Image (tube, rainbow, N blue to C red):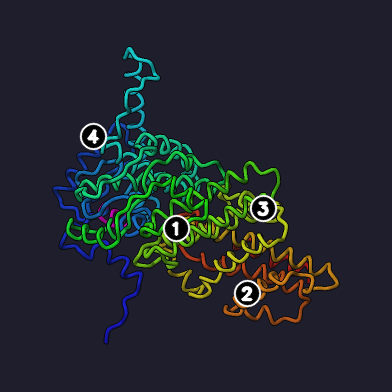
Amino acid sequence: MQFKRLEHLQRHERIHRSDSAFVIPWNISPSTYEIICNAIRMHAGILPMTFTIPSRHTISRYIEGYFRGFHEHFPFLHPPTFRIDTVAPELLLSMAAMGALYRFEHTKGYELYFTSKAIVLHLLQQRSGVAAHNLMNRNISPRSDSPKQPLSPAEIQTMQALLILVDMATGSGEPLSQDSLPLGGQLAVLTRQGGLGVYDEIETDAEWKDWVRREERRRTMFFAYILLNIQSIAFDIPPLIMNREIGLCLPHCNVEWVTTTETEWRHMRNKYGHTEQQFYPTLNKILQGKDVYTAEPLSSLGNYALINALIQRIFFERQISDGPDLQSDKVKVLEIALQAWQRSWEATFESSLDPSSPKGPLGFNSAALLRLAYLRLNANLGPSRNLSSLNPQDISAAFTQNSAIFTRSSHVDRAVLQCIHALSIPIRVGIPFVASTQTMNGSIPHPLCTLECAFLLSRWLGSISDTIQSSPAGLDSLREDERKLLGMIISLIRETDRAGSLERNEHDSFCIQRMAATTVRLWAETFRGVHVFPIVSIVGQSLSTIADILEGQLGVIA
């Protein structure tokens, strides 16, 4: 008898299913290890005094952790052609640092982080010094029209190392979080210098190795843009790279990226297509509500970049708005754009709502950002979360003290519906199961979306409770759509072990307040366990504290 293979096992098979076709990236021979050590020792003068090079087997374990974990969410390196003996030491050390986190060896990961950071900053300082020297010793104007030289392959590796370090700092608590914005600024500069604004069409007759080199550069710059946009989402700050700066074409499908031979690559290109679509014109089509997948579906990474672009557009619309609510015509345009984006997501065969899908987690991360986009568009509670404090007590205090203003409306109903859909996923799968299996899920967009959904849904339920309590008509004072939303929440709670909370003989307003506490508690329970990134634990602790507060208020009222 044969059993169907679990999807998460299939996902891990992707890296090594063609082991015979290429060298496994984390296989390190003694001679290769000596090459790695010599490359690191060349920077001995700038490395932390306490740093010692990890053993061959330790580096192998960490690099495996990188490819089996972080690489799934940021696939900008090309495993089939990756050669560890030619990788720049700063990139290797940053990969090892991230891989150590995915092996839950956080202390060693942080040591490697600071070592890689020392080399990266030294190289950037050297690069800046050379530019300053050339400027002072050339008889030309700083406004010269001489063409800029693209980043060399070595400089691209420095940018990739910096990208990994920025993500690690963004997902960590103190003190690494202090690095996230300064290093993010450096990453933005290097990304622009790498050709972010250049149209980079890859010819249809390109050779495989040339395509890999150019696609890797493109993916690296798009992931830099995405990561810096996620910083903006998390900490409510202006994004460091604007949509209009991007001249690149959208990345190709992951099935092409993971091919191990030129023959296999050409087969996938012929099967799935290879039409180049430039990022910014495609974004404009989506903003007009037009379908962008008619020629062929976009890649999951292309959709991921575009949903980040729509959230950035919403951010700036909020910044120029005179009040808490956007003008209805702007909301309509952006909702039509989100619907067009969703059609593109649904047309992409790589899309999935399962973070462990063999298709990769980018579709899952994109879906989380779609929900967050609806929330930011229709009920902007993002700034009230105080997530930048990275302190569960401060975040929970912001929940109780900062009563963000929003008026219940059909627009808010749509945001609430997204919250309900978000909660339905862990309930459908099983909250204990989600809590025990998402430990290795390194998604940052997902907990960001969860925190915002919990804020909005509990606030909305509180507002509904107040309306029912103050109105003689009770539940009849609500609009029909609001009553339907309440019914959906009740149905979800009945599917959990907290269904008994609905059976108490309580006034409707009090029951709805209890529902607010219950929904937050259910979300909090999905974050139990150890996590790769401390920021995920911070979100879980914050939700648990908020649930405690709401449950405590029930006792006071009773």
Q: Is residue 86 magenta?
A: no
User: Is disc 1 surrounded by few (<14), some (14 to 19) or many (20+) residues within 10 Å?
Assistant: many
Looking at marks 3 and 1 on the same chain, the residue that comes earlier in the sequence is marked by 3
Q: Nearer the viewer, mark 3 or mark 1?
A: 3
Q: Position of residue 12 (x, y in %)?
A: 30, 65
Please indicate, yes or no, whether residue 172 appears anywhere in the rendered image: no
Q: Is residue 61 magenta?
A: yes
Q: Position of residue 183 (x, y in %)?
A: 43, 38
Query: Pointer 1: what residue?
Result: 443
Residue occupying image coordinates x 38% and y 36%: 190
Query: Pointer 4: what residue?
Result: 42
Q: Amino acid at mark 2?
A: Met
Query: Residue 488: which disc?
Result: 2
Image quarter (top left, top right, bottom left or bottom right) of the N terminus: bottom left
Image quarter (top left, top right, bottom left or bottom right) of the C terminus: bottom right
Residue furthest to the right: 472
Nearest the viewer among 164 and 318 is 318
Left or right, residue 22 beside residue 389: left
Query: Residue 328: which disc?
Result: 3
Left or right, residue 176 beside residue 466: left
Looking at marks 2 and 1 on the same chain, the residue that comes earlier in the sequence is marked by 1
Q: Amino acid at mark 3?
A: Ser
Looking at marks 3 and 4 on the same chain, the residue that comes earlier in the sequence is marked by 4
Q: Nearer the viewer, mark 4 or mark 1?
A: 1
Please indicate, yes or no, whether residue 358 appears anywhere in the rendered image: yes
Query: Residue 356: which disc?
Result: none
